[in-house]
Image: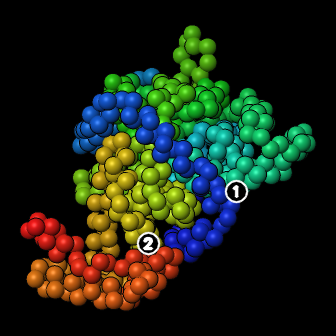
Amino acid sequence: MQFTSVDFQRNVSKALNDPFLQQALQRGMHGFVGKRADAVSAVPEFEQLRDEARDIKNHTLTYLDYYLEKFEASVTRLGGHVHWASDAREARELVLEICRKAKAKTITKGKSMAGEEIDLNEALEAAGHEVVETDLGEYIIQLAKEPPSHIIAPAVHKTRDQVSDLFHEHHRALGFEQRLTEVPALVDEARQVLRRKFLSADVGITGANFLIAETGSNVIVTNEGNGDLTSTLPRVHVVTAGIEKVLPTLEDMTVLMRVLARSATGQEASTYTTVFSGPRRAGDRDGPEEYHVVLIDSGRTAILGGEFQDILRCIRCGACLNHCPVWGSVGGHAYGWCYSGPMGAVLTPLLKDLEAAKHLPNACTLNGRCEQNCPVRIPLPALLRKLRHRQYEARLTSAMTRYGLRLWTFLATRPALYRLAFAAVARSLRVLGGRRGALSRVPFAGGWTAGRDLPVPQGTTFQSQWRARNES
């Protein structure tokens, strides 16, 4: 998904007025929250697991150069190849060269956010390759010529009727004449179409949930098995992954696995968890003849060791998106790149451009649900506040916003004046609200009152009420 700049306000307006999107979001997202809560409640030690997962990722990031070199040595020992890409352009060129040498015609792909990040499909198709996404959600949006709207559910923005129309349009030429409407029938039709591609593919490209330094393995987690077929059937297997995906040992991976599926889909474990270690060896019944791993930096090294390093702990579970009221209202496309929701609001300005993505750190109510549900305890609200501070320092915020923040700072650092000023505001709002008890318009808060009324305060501030309660 190519990134240029994010017109977030326009995207939000479009999303809120799209009845099909709103219908899809309402039907598709509520289940994630409830299933996660049930899965977590069944594991008494889940909070301890979150601590362990956080510590494993922190340790790995501290010694990332060591573990990356160890991973490369392990892959080479197995007969595989590791390629280093400093940016998206270099990553694309490396994959294209591998496919050229393989004389690839058909390429199957497993779901990979790294592939989306580097615009891999567009580059492969421009070079004349047939590229087929094999994850059902990714396959749907490929037919629709749209980017993913969610990390783990890329087609969650599509209704069943829209998927039915897409399949009927694209599959008729393959002999599927009937327009199907039931989910099992649609899934079966997609399975029949994709099976032909699995069997004819020359190269298979996947992402990696984890890379294991001690064994040189890549680990993929799916619920469809498409990743396994993409990895084992073609002659060449290519893995694309960010450098932060490496872990020291398989034992470390098991800790992350215990929090990943529960946080993502509310499952104890995903249906398929597969560890791939190099190309086919003598005596193996299946597997690729060639095994390549393309490690992508693309701005990650610049984040290491700084105030935003915590975001590199992200394991792409989507829990922050699922619990975000903003994402749940506008979907992922509004964020303008493949990463959306709270993690995207942090990662996109860091990996791309703070000015072009200036609205994203502000697309948050700072309610804290993302941090509460993150399996590796990323302090997302704190990181978003730091990005807002960077914007302020770089004068990327409006003059009105900077003036308002200076005024707030002046009052907040003078407690007596602060109490006096906000007591007057509370009384004024109480009077303006009158008998109705709500305000439809408030000066300097047009965005808040455009779609809702503001309940008026009781006439006194929270601090004065708290003080009176303690004195009584």
Between 178 and 204, the one lying in front of the other is 178
Q: Does the rendering let one see residue 303?
A: no
Q: Amino acid at mark 1?
A: Lys
Residue 165 at x, y percent in the picture: 80, 52
Q: Which mark is residue 145?
A: 1
Q: Does the rendering let one see residue 386?
A: yes
Residue 210 in the image: above or below residue 21 = above
Which residue is tagged 2? Answer: 359
Residue 344 in the image: above or below residue 361 = above
10 Å neighbourhood of mark 2: few (<14), some, or many (≥20)? many
| Quadrant of the drawing holding the C terminus | bottom left
Mark 2 residue element: loop
Query: How far is mark 2 from mark 1, CA to CA?
Result: 25 Å
Residue depicted at 36% across the width and 46% down the height: 374
10 Å neighbourhood of mark 1: few (<14), some, or many (≥20)? few
Residue 320 at x, y percent in the picture: 42, 51
Between 348 and 211, the one lying in front of the other is 348
Residue 467 in the image: above or below residue 161 = below
Instruction: State how many labels appear.
Output: 2
Residue depicted at 26% across the width and 42% down the height: 58
Mark found first going from the N terminus, 2 or 1: 1
| Quadrant of the drawing holding the N terminus | bottom right
Given the current orientation, which residue lies at the most extreme left position?
471
Mark 1 residue element: loop
The picture quadrant where one finds residue 280 is: top right
